[in-house]
Each structure stands twice: as C-alpha cells, then as structure tokens.
Amino acid sequence: MTDEMLREIFKETKVIAVVGFSANPARPSHYVAAYLQAKGYRVIPVNPGLAGQSALGETVYPDLAAIPAGIAVDMIDIFRAPEAVPGVVAEALSALPALKTVWMQLGVISAEGAAMAQAAGKRVVMDRCPKMEMPRLGL
C-alpha cells in the first residue's frame, strides 16, 4: 500500500465502521474512532456488548449487518483478533454494498481476510493505524 493509495483512501472515505469499538476512552479503538471523527469522518461504532447505546454521538451496532442500509459505510477499521478477521470481512462484503476499504489495525494481520476482500475488489490496509498514518502523510 503506497502513500498515494493511502491518501486516496483518506480522501474518498466518508463513513467508517469501527469494528471492536470500546467505550473506554483509554482503549485504542475508542481514541482512534474519536480522532477519525474529529477529522470529519462519520464513525459508526460496532460492538455487540454495547449495542443500542450511544457513543461519540452515534448508535452502537452489534455487528455490521445491523447498520441501517441508509448509512453507506466506505471503510471498516478492524480492532479484533486476527482469527476473527475473515468472519468480519465476510459479513462486511455481504452487508455493506458501499464498502471500498478493509483496514486492519496495528497487529491485526489476516492473509485470509485480505485475500477475501481483494477478491471482491476492495482495497486492503493491514497492520497500520489511520491515526498514525494521517499525520505521517500530512493529513
């Protein structure tokens, strides 16, 4: 994934579903979501344990399939264990028609999940954090 491709992703993305969102502000999934929201993205929190609650001014959904069809999610940002990624990607591919990018956070590496997303024509970023990449790219 080149810097030019990353810039394109950040420019084209409008709505990001954060899979594995935590209500704890000290957790990376929370402060990365808050950072992305502060940068102007709509962030949709996804966590079955917090479903129905409000976080960062948005409803928390139990899974990607529960996100209403009217919310066009461009990117998913996965904060889950690597072994969970193929299931998350499969759900995203079936539930999110506007999906363009599958992003796996630092330490989240899944060749299987990446291959599934790429086979469906989606861009894949793996083992990186948008909160670190945006400042590095001057965004």
Image (cartoon, rainbow, N blue to C red):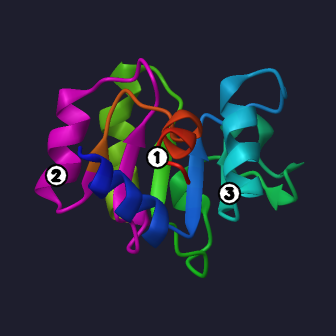
Distance between the alpha carbons at the discs numbered 3 and 2: 23 Å
Label 2: how many Cα within 10 Å (few below 14, some 14–19, many 20+): some
| Sooner in the amino-acid sequence: mark 3 or mark 1 | 3
Which residue is label 1 attached to? 137
Which residue is label 3 attached to? 43
Q: Position of residue 16 (x, y in %)?
A: 57, 58
The amino acid at mark 1 is Leu
Q: Residue at x 45, y 20 (%)?
A: 81
Q: Residue at x 79, y 39 (%)?
A: 50
The amino acid at mark 3 is Val
Please tell me whether residue 64 belongs to the stretch shown in magenta: no
Q: Foreground residue, 110 or 138?
A: 138
Q: Which residues are magenta?
A: 95-123
Q: Left or right: where does residue 48 sit relative to residue 136?
A: right
Q: Secondary structure at mark 3?
A: strand
Front of the two marks 3 and 1: 1
Label 1: how many Cα within 10 Å (few below 14, some 14–19, many 20+): few
Q: Position of residue 68 (x, y in %)?
A: 62, 72
Please tell me whether residue 122 belongs to the stretch shown in magenta: yes
Q: Secondary structure at mark 1?
A: loop
Label 3: how many Cα within 10 Å (few below 14, some 14–19, many 20+): many
